[in-house]
Image: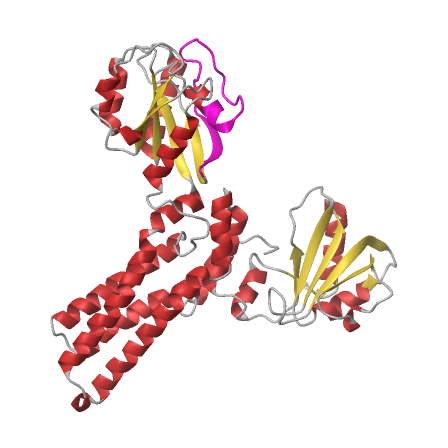
Amino acid sequence: MNEDTIAAVATALGEGSIAVVRVSGAEAIGKVAPLFKSREDLREVRSHTVHYGWIKDPDSGDVLDEVLVTVMKGPRSFTAEDVVEISTHGGIVAVQSVLELLLRSGIRMAEPGEFTKRAFLNGRIDLAQAEAVIDLIRSKSSKAFQVARKQAEGALSKRLVPLKEQLIELLAHVEVNIDYPEHDVAEVTAGVIRDHCGAVLRQVETLLKTAAEGKILREGIVTAIVGRPNAGKSSLLNALVKENRAIVTDIPGTTRDIVEESVTLSGIPLRLLDTAGIRETEDVVERIGVERSRGALGDADLILLVLSRSEALHEEERRLLEELKDRPTIVILNKSDLAPCLEEEEVRSMYPSERIVSLSAKEGLGMEDLERAVSKLFMSGGIESADATYVSNVRHISLLHASARSLQDAIDGAEQGLPVDLIQIDIAAAWESLGEIVGDTASESLLDQIFSKFCLGK
């Protein structure tokens, strides 16, 4: 690991009340101390204390800014190294001048994610916790944030550690059988393998059952709002985002292009796509919008098919109902505040009741029913924020699947009477997959790839 002392801006660039420049490394305190003018010498202060003073250029004698400096001595810091955080006035000029002075003083600019990488390499956190830091920053909802926070605290890692320990114990037993076959019976070893691998496999499968829901919380759901012109698609979008985001008129074909918005529904982040009304048209511009609507249908994770209860079913709507019934679709019977003309029995004969919602987007009636329908369709177990024993990271999900396959292969090999030295390969592969999640067996190239996704200040 590089022993350089590093620095970077830890807050977003732009105007603000304060900005923070973070410095970490063995020489962090010693490098900052000559630049900080105060009644106190930073080299002599206690750890985890804040000090008032000025950052001053020793060459020119110019005062760059009035600051607060926080000193955190390793290993009781995020990186487990000495860390100094300089709180300057917000704005590009102040923070850049302080950072440039630090770099001229022999401190190196941090690489993306290098602070978190040092925390991992110094044993402060494991790789799963480090990746959760990204999820904390990118959380799209309060539930996603709470899940990421639990992961950053090590919830997933705590579940994996005992599983890895069970596999290590099993590998040790198998090694004894290989080295001293006269002291063991093959049938006994096969039974031990089946029992131990089966127990670990059940735990891995329990984690994988929550993967789809965790991925939804982490990445959100691409949601296409489709239907005929004037069915109330734009009104539904406005009702969901609680503002007049889309133009609503009584003139069919008002929406010509896809309007995008983001909203959180029952803790689930949705990326809403309000599409042009699907119908046959001679209008060239509207026809392009209809084609884009068809494209959005193909990309959507969730489809909200809006029908107007105040009109009888059109042939295009019948085709859409038939086309989408095997897709994750919720049928919206809109305009429930008006006299009904639509034959609901025809719709209900094609879709289960939990995937049909009556509402009035214009009046905001029935929106709670839509929230419940979306939650029931995608969140089978109804994830609670306190339950952080599931995975949401694609890399973790892939490695858990790999571990599960190796465990099943080991069980199958034991049942088929294969030599234990061959079964040992599958057990070791399962252990390595679990270890790669927390970083025990991760390669340097994988670490570089993961931490390159971080911003400089992290």
Left or right position of 415 against 432: left
Image quadrant where residue 157 sits: bottom left
Left or right position of 363 against 396: right
Tell whether position 424 is magenta: no
Q: Which residues are magenta?
A: 237-266
The one of 191 and 63 positioned closer to us in this rendering: 191
Point 56% across, 66% down: residue? 118
Residue 257 visible? The answer is no
In terms of secondary structure, what is the magenta stretch mainly?
A: loop
Residue 237 visible? The answer is yes
Tell whether position 249 is magenta: yes
Q: Looking at the picture, does residue 314 appear above or below residue 422?
A: above
The one of 196 and 91 positioned closer to us in this rendering: 196
Q: Looking at the picture, does residue 305 appear above or below residue 457?
A: above
Point 22% across, 74% down: residue? 193
Q: Position of residue 315 (x, y in %)?
A: 24, 14
Q: Position of residue 273 (x, y in %)?
A: 42, 28
Q: Quadrant of the C terminus?
A: bottom right
Image quadrant where residue 331 sits: top left
Q: Position of residue 187 (x, y in %)?
A: 13, 79
Q: Position of residue 69 (x, y in %)?
A: 76, 60
The one of 374 and 428 positioned closer to us in this rendering: 374
Point 43% across, 27% down: residue? 367
Q: Quadrant of the N terminus?
A: bottom right
